[in-house]
Amino acid sequence: MTAWEGWPLDRMLYAFLGAAYALIWLQLTLMHWRGGFHNAVMWGPVLVTPLLAVGAFVVASLRGEVIDAAFAVLFGVGTAIGLVGTAMHLRGDAAQIGGLTLRNMMSGPPPVLPLLYMALAVLGLAIHYWPSAGAAA
């Protein structure tokens, strides 16, 4: 890839993704801590999300084949974590008395947060691979 000049849209979006994952990490860590990490899968996003944030910030400032490949793998893992998290949160809500109801989704594990997590990872991959994303506007 060529060197960047200024702050094109893709570079700003990478920085946004880094900040978004840093904030999401704070929230999900508090919520999984509240849940007592009763399932080992809960450690996945707590440990991987800081790497997603740092990876996005690194790609916003540096480019290279190794960095680009690491970013793609990392954000692929982020997509998978979001998908697994959505399934686990819905399963947790369904296990409550009354099953999968709005009330249980409001009081149990939030099913939208892992969807957001996954959507941000997919956005990062789309920015990375979309041919016109790096083009100057």
Image (cartoon, rainbow, N blue to C red):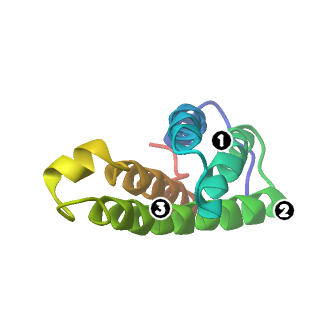
Residue where numbered disc 2 is placed: 66
- Counting residues from the start of the chain, the first of labels 1 and 2 encountered is 1
Q: Is residue 80 above or below residue 67?
A: below
Question: Which residue is depicted at the point 53% across and 54% down?
Answer: 124
Q: Is residue 115 visible?
A: yes
- Counting residues from the start of the chain, the first of labels 3 and 1 encountered is 1
The Cα–Cα distance between marks 2 and 3, rounded to whole angstroms, is 28 Å
Q: Nearer the viewer, residue 120 or 88?
A: 88
Residue where numbered disc 1 is placed: 53
Question: Which residue is depicted at the point 72% across and 47% down?
Answer: 51
The Cα–Cα distance between marks 1 and 2, rounded to whole angstroms, is 17 Å
Q: Quadrant of the C terminus?
A: top left
The amino acid type, in three-letter code, at marker 2 is Val
The amino acid type, in three-letter code, at marker 3 is Gly
Q: Is residue 132 visible?
A: no
The Cα–Cα distance between marks 3 and 1, rounded to whole angstroms, is 18 Å
* Secondary structure under the numbered disc 1 in the rendered image: helix
- In the picture as drawn, the residue positioned furthest to the front comes out as 97
Q: Residues within 10 Å of mark 1 (few under 14, many from 20)?
A: many
Residue 106 in picture, x, y percent from top left:
24, 44
Task: Tell me where residue 7 sits by quadrant.
Answer: top right
Mark nearest the camera among 1 and 2 is: 1
Residue 8 in picture, x, y percent from top left:
55, 38
Residue where numbered disc 3 is placed: 85
Q: Is residue 13 left or right of residue 103?
A: right
Q: Is residue 11 above or below residue 84?
A: above
Q: Quadrant of the N terminus?
A: bottom right
* Secondary structure under the numbered disc 3 in the rendered image: helix
